[in-house]
Image: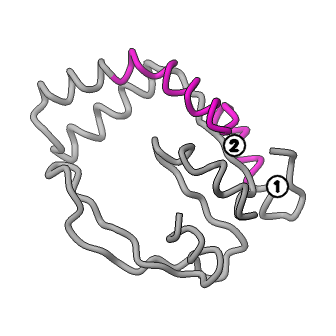
Amino acid sequence: METIARLARDGKAEVPVYAIGADRQVATRTFEVAGSPLFVAEGIFAAEIVDECRRRGLLAGAYALRRPRGATFLRRLARDLAEQRKAPRVLLRRGLALLRAEPAVLRRQAGLGARPAPAGEVLRRVADLLAGHPHQS
């Protein structure tokens, strides 16, 4: 949360660099938003901070991508295999578990304040925010 507040206030912050195959942080780096009026915090845990971002006046919008589960499974598996993140058997087993869990994850993110929406709608809403015409979040 403090990193997001620093990015919003100063336009830059130190962020962790993770090695997914090693399951740990391996370094830090400076991240700069380069004068952009907003930035996107994304990931499976992003919804966890929606309320606090809203409370601090840092939230322009909160969305949870709603995509076809099979397509998400195939994209994730192809990416993870190409990047050799783990053994193929582990990736397949993990991918199937994530496929089954996806509806519950989406419900949880919605409960935390993220609005489920397809990718095209999220992109339009972000474009509107950049253009200065925000939709109600």
Query: Where are the magenta residues, as a range?
Result: 98-126
Main secondary-structure element of the magenta-colored stretch: helix
- Three-letter amino acid code at disc 2? Val
The circle drawn on residue 29 is none
Residue ID at (60%, 84%):
10
- Three-letter amino acid code at disc 1? Asp
Label 2: state its secondary structure.
helix
Q: Position of residue 112 (x, y in %)?
A: 62, 37
Q: Is residue 60 left or right of residue 82?
A: right
Q: Nearer the viewer, residue 128 or 9?
A: 9
Badge count: 2
Which color scheme does this rendered protein use?
one colour
Which residue is disc 1 drawn over? 128
Vertical placement of 137 versus 18: above or below? above
Which residue is disc 2 drawn over? 122
Q: Nearer the viewer, residue 128 or 4?
A: 4
